[in-house]
Image (cartoon, rainbow, N blue to C red):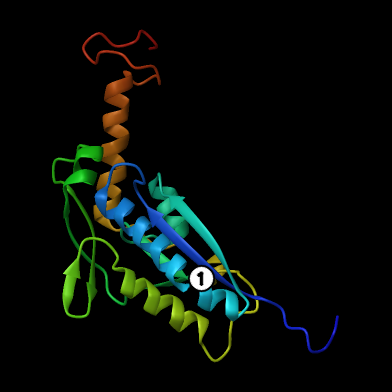
Amino acid sequence: MNPTTTLPRTLTIELLAIDLATCSRCTGSLANLEQAIATLQPVLASTGTAVDFHKILVESEAQAQQLRFVSSPTIRVNGQDISLETTESRCGDCSDISGSQGGTACRTWSYQGESHTEAPVGMIVDAILRALYQAEPPTSAVSPLDSAAPTAVPQNLQAFFQAKAGRKANLTGGCGTPQPVATGCGCA
């Protein structure tokens, strides 16, 4: 290798969410994340920085625990949550998905003195630029979370996954085949 040749930098960007089809907060944050990456593409290209982008659908409490997932949606750049604080409010879309009696709360984003239900493009751009211009750029795309022990899943997410699983079991009669709940499926 030529001593003057430098290895390209890689930023690992992750979107973690409990729904990527229906929830307006998750789909809106995904669209804003994609817009932020597209906006920064000339800067990333001119600095020799590649983006390793992952959309992660968190489907269970065990997966949430392993990923150290505390609120939906979450955006991480090189393993660091782009939001310094976790605030939430009731999300009608995810409450409908789970069927939870108490409803489901999803993340809100505080940026420039305002609260948003979707991650603002400017906030995402700021986080990517901070990661890009750190004094010591990461030498690998390994997330700091890879070596960390799993953490407890917040009660809000536990309730979401339990209600969603219960709702699915009721819709399938408990055997994986959609059946009317009253008649069951005969798989006892």
Which residue extends farthest right? 1
Q: Position of residue 144 (x, y in %)?
A: 53, 72
Q: Amino acid at mark 1?
A: Gln
Q: For this rendering, which residue is in front, 127 or 144?
A: 127
Residue identifier under label 1: 41
Callout 1: helix, strand or loop? Answer: helix
| Residue 85 placement, left or right of 177 | left
- Location of residue 53 with respect to 98 vertically, above or below: below
Residue 3, image quadrant? bottom right
Q: Looking at the image, which residue is at 85% across and 84% down?
A: 2
Q: How many marks?
A: 1
Say which of 2 and 90 sits in front.
2
Residue situated in front as seen by the camera: 119 or 69: 119
- In the image, 36 versus 82, the foreground residue is 36
* Residue at image coords 49%, 66%: 13
Question: The C terminus is located in which quarter?
Answer: top left
Residue in view at x 30 percent, y 65 percent: 119
Residue 134 picture location, percent across and down? 51, 87
Local packing at callout 1 (Cα closer than 10 Å; few below 14, some 14-19, many 20+) is: some
Q: Is residue 9 visible?
A: yes
Residue at 43 percent of width and 70 percent of height? 39
Q: Is residue 60 left or right of residue 6?
A: left
Q: Position of residue 183 (x, y in %)?
A: 25, 8
Res 31 quadrant in image: bottom left
In the drawing, does residue 7 fall left or right of residue 165?
right
